[in-house]
């Protein structure tokens, strides 16, 4: 017994400095945490999902949804090295996306980013155009050979990679300026003039409805001189369909179209990339539900008609763009050989590299081609086997 008492006394004596040391380390950690994250706020979530503003070295995208996920720690807060499984998990837990929706968004997103962007218009599939000649087959083989491997497609991404123009990123965004001519990347930062224009479509009840979204999209397409191609117009409708579905006030994945989204929530999310205090998904957002909303937006846009909205209520400051030369785009088609009679040329990427620090990484994956190269290659695959000049 005495032996046991001696042991416990020795233990408590040797534990005391250890306890004091641990307390000190704990306090120091708290102080250093407060130093490294000076923007921690208390009124959103606490702990792991507290809202923290990004620092200047953090990576962010033109997508408000993904920036929000990083600002709340559902994705790495620095926005870097994001794996597909990380993104799937974040979309499900923060936005209530079902597994099929999260998979389509994630794997579809990685695929679009790491592959040639879809051609502006698909070639017509007339019987004559389907007869593939030997030369077009050899082009097809080259294209297939130069497609990135699955490992490259699914490699982790930084959020800023997503600004790669005309892959997922597109013209006529609601709150982002179009990619400047000859630029590989579109701006990541929000254009606050466009944002004010977007918010001007709110209803008098301070909600943002499907009709608000449809009118805002018609206006942005008009202001961008309809430079958005049909594929990306569909992507753009999908983006806002997701917003209506996830934040819509109803308890279903298609929401209540007339009810819309509360403006304070919509404003905070779009402008600050922040979720409201106490946020939790109200329902499971499905793939089919999102497609339904997207179709409904398309229907309203078609009823309004091209150019049917030329300014936002009470906002007259945003000008329509003039016609712009096609921007340069990045593609993995570097190994495609084009016949010497063709005038197709590989564009220099030197100025683009210096203009965009993100490029070195993207460039390592995908060399650059002029926009028309891909159209010509597609034409040669689907067409009569000749590169049409
Ligand atoms: C719940 C999921 C998501 C929602 C609610 C959402 C919503 C949005 C919205 C509203 C925009 C339009 C921004 C604007 O017009 O200014 C946008 C843009 C964008 N999103 Fe997302 N997004 C989601 C998931 C994703 C995923 C998974 C990816 C890629 C892996 C992605 C990539 C992008 C990109 C690249 C843009 C820029 C498009 C542009 O040029 O406007 N988004 N997103």
Image (cartoon, rainbow, N blue to C red):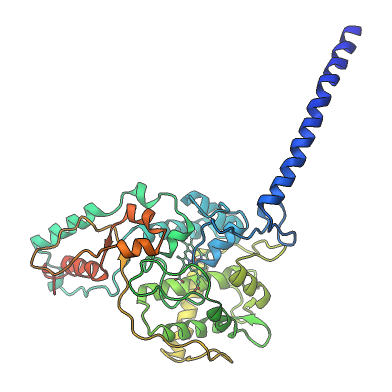
Q: How many marks?
A: 0
Res. 254 visible in picture: no
Q: Is residue 69 left or right of residue 167?
A: right
Q: Is residue 352 left or right of residue 236?
A: left
Q: Quadrant of residue 19?
A: top right
What residue is at 74 percent from the left and 62 percent from the top?
43
Q: Image height check: is 235 above or below 305?
A: above
Q: In the rendered view of the protein, which quadrant contains the C terminus?
A: bottom left
What residue is at 28 percent from the left and 61 percent from the top?
368
Q: Is residue 201 left or right of residue 2?
A: left
Viewer-proximal residue, 280 or 26? Answer: 26
Q: Is residue 224 left or right of residue 326?
A: right
Q: Quadrant of residue 370?
A: bottom left
Q: In the rendered view of the protein, which quadrant contains the N terminus?
A: top right
Viewer-proximal residue, 132 or 142? Answer: 142
Res. 112 visible in picture: yes
Q: Residue 100 location, x and y as percent? A: 48, 58
Q: Residue 303 location, x and y as percent? A: 45, 89
Q: Image height check: is 139 above or below 130?
A: above
Viewer-proximal residue, 51 or 119? Answer: 51
Viewer-proximal residue, 327 or 101? Answer: 327
Q: Residue 239 location, x and y as percent? A: 49, 70
Q: Residue 215 location, x and y as percent? A: 51, 85
């Amino acid at each position: 017994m005495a032996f046991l008492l001696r042991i416990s006394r020795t233990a408590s004596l040797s534990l005391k400095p250890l306890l004091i040391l641990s307390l000190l380390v704990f306090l120091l950690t708290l102080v250093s945490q407060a130093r490294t994250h000076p923007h921690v706020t208390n009124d959103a979530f606490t702990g792991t999902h507290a809202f923290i503003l990004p620092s200047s070295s953090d990576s962010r995208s033109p997508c408000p949804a993904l920036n929000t996920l990083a600002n709340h720690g559902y994705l790495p807060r620095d926005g870097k090295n994001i794996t597909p499984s990380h993104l799937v998990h974040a979309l499900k837990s923060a936005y209530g996306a079902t597994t099929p929706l999260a998979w389509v968004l994630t794997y579809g997103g990685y695929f679009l980013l790491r592959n040639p962007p879809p051609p502006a218009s698909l070639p017509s599939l007339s019987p004559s155009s389907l007869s593939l000649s030997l030369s077009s087959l050899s082009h097809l083989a080259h294209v297939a050979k130069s497609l990135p491997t699955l490992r490259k497609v699914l490699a982790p991404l930084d959020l800023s990679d997503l600004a790669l123009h005309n892959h997922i990123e597109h013209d006529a965004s609601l709150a982002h300026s179009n990619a400047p001519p000859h630029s590989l990347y579109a701006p990541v930062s929000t254009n606050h003039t466009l944002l004010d224009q977007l918010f001007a479509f709110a209803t008098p009840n301070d909600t943002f409805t499907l009709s608000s979204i449809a009118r805002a999209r018609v206006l942005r397409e008009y202001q961008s001189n309809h430079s958005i191609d049909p594929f990306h117009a569909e992507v753009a409708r999908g983006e806002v369909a997701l917003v209506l579905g996830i934040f819509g006030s109803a308890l279903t994945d298609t929401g209540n179209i007339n009810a819309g989204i509360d403006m304070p929530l919509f404003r905070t999310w779009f402008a600050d990339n922040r979720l409201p205090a106490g946020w939790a998904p109200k329902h499971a957002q499905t793939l089919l539900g999102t497609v339904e909303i997207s179709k409904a937006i398309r229907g309203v846009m078609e009823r309004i008609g091209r150019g049917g909205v030329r300014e936002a209520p009470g906002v007259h400051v945003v000008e329509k763009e003039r016609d712009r030369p096609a921007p340069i785009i990045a593609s993995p088609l570097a190994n495609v050989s084009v016949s010497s009679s063709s005038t197709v040329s590989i564009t220099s990427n030197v100025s683009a590299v210096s203009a965009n620090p993100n490029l070195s990484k993207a460039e390592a994956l995908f060399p650059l081609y002029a926009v028309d190269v891909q159209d010509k290659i597609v034409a040669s695959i689907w067409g009569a086997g000749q590169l049409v000049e």
